[in-house]
Image (cartoon, coloured by chain):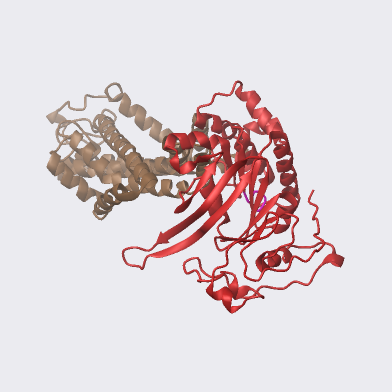
Chain colours: A brown, B red
Amino acid sequence: MIKHRALALLKAVSTFKGGISGAFLLLLVIGALFAPWLSPYPYDQQDLGIMNQAPSLTHLFGTDEFGRDVLSRMITGARTSLSVSVTAIGISVLLGLVLGATCGYFGGTFDRIVMTVIDLTWSFPEILIALMLVAIIGPGLEGVVIAIAIAYLAQFTRLTRTQIMSLKSETYVEATISLGAGHAHVLFSHLLPNALAPVLVAAMLATGDAIILEATLGFFGLGAQPPTPSWGAMMSSGTAQLFIAPWVILLPGLAVALTVVFLNLFGDAVIAALDVRAKFREA
Amino acid sequence: MSDLLTVNGLSRRFSDGGLFRKRKVFHAVSDVSFTLKRGQILGVVGESGCGKSTLARLVLRLINPSAGQVQFDGVDMASLSRTDMRRLRQRMQLVFQDPYSAIDPRYSIRDALLEPYRVQGVKPKSTDDTVSSLLDMVGLNGSLAASYPHQLSGGQKQRVGIARALALNPSLVVLDEPTASLDVSVQAQIVSLLERLRQELGLTYLFISHDLGLVRYFCDQILVMYLGRIVEVLPSDAAPAHPYTRALLDSTFEPDPKRRRSITRLGGEIPSGYDLPPGCAFANRCPRVTDLCRRVLPTLTTQGSGHQAACHHPLAAVPEVVEQRSVA
């Protein structure tokens, strides 16, 4: 099974779309991981003598209103944006899998209660839920992580539940039960492995949305607190000098856009590669 | 020979509807009783929707009955705890109609064949030997172990399904239309494989099919179902007494034109399982119907040795040449 996953990933990366997007995302992750060593200046080093300077050889992406190096701040900001969105979606997927699998497999009153609550959150846009939750928890990265995780919980719970419910009526599940299998075996050896692929792909696509949501919350000043940079917070502070120093808002914006686009492309490539049958047809 | 399976007054109703709709009750299986002796093959025939598959699942307790009881080897299954029931499943297995979906697409044939042991917590001595002997037993090449279900043909998959069912050395195997979704030539192979395995392993079969010709060839005793009820129990070489069995038998295809008979076609519709008629369910399609049939439900009455029919006006037991259909 693990061999398959690795094989699928390899297959995804070997296509043009998957290769390009995979390379970009890998670069981004490396950048985020080694931010302190890769950034040319400390992200919080102010120099009021070089405020709002256009991109140049000394400051490749220019400087912001405090004379801080925009490139260094973007590299460090990638760390915030990526870790927040990946952690949040990770929590959301895990919770969604547990809730969705329980609801879909056992059904009954528990299912009805959980799904009613989930449907309620479904009727609000994610940004509203996240804003409300951050307002309750208070601004800061932990708050943003929890808010994003809960905002996307409905999606993963519903998806897992639907998958489990449709897989539950497959003949091979009945066959396993007739062999004498218990709930745990049916769930963990048949239902979840078969339900996982679409959930993982949805998670990858949602990570793109979560980066935007994190940026939005950062833009409202609810996410990372100064001087910690995040792409959203950088754009927020960049609005003031949009016409004097447009690079301060445009470059982090571009980073958000590119990351989301490449995450979507990579997700597509993985969808194509995860189809077990397609893989064998070509082999 | 002792009875392996005793079924008594088994019924299953499904209800649907609820909050806004009138609650409706569907009678899938009503008051079914029979016994199955060790080493015998009991055929269950009937049209689609007559409750054959529900009966199979009731017998294996994959669904719970609304009434009645099933005794397996003298043990009432309703009295067993969940754990004991799971353990008992080793001794009774099910082979499915659709071999295409009976194996998890993510499982290799090897994993699928080892799953019964995993589920029951039994460790085979050598996994490789177990897999190859199971494949060998159903006439498959050992090299298929590494393949995945979608790489196999329907017949091969059904053989894997049979091997999986036999992995734990069961006493009873319920075959739920094991040949229905296969080509005719493959059907014959599967039937002769089942026959060989029964002799080698001393198995008892409950063979469910809609093909009365096949059942007559393969089984010792036949149970004919119509709308959830048994309408006739007959030894496989006996002439049918129930008009429905007669009609079913007439509908089997006779390849030899000289032996083709005139067929009395059945008109009318099968009544709905939601709204069973008070009398005989077959009344509105029966050529021999009388007023009595519409009012009173006929019960099974003895027609001969090992032969019972639920009919007010059974066909006379005229001695007739029963054609032996050869399948091989």
Q: Is residue A252 shown to the viewer in this render?
A: yes
Q: Is residue A258 shown to the viewer in this render?
A: no
Is residue B177 in the magenta section? yes
Q: Is residue A3 left or right of residue A234?
A: right
Q: Is residue B146 left or right of residue B9?
A: right
Q: Position of residue B10 (x, y in %)?
A: 51, 53
Q: Position of residue B144 (x, y in %)?
A: 67, 34
Which is nearer the eye, A67 or B243? B243
Which is nearer the eye, B95 or B276? B276
Q: Residue A259, located in which quarter of the rendered image?
A: top left
Magenta stretch bounds: B176-180
Q: Is residue B9 left or right of residue B267?
A: left
Q: Position of residue B85 (x, y in %)?
A: 47, 37
Which is nearer the eye, B104 or B35? B35
Q: Residue furthest right?
A: B258
The residue at the point 52 percent across, 57 percent down is B31
In the image, residue B47 sits, relative to residue A49, either above or below, namely: below
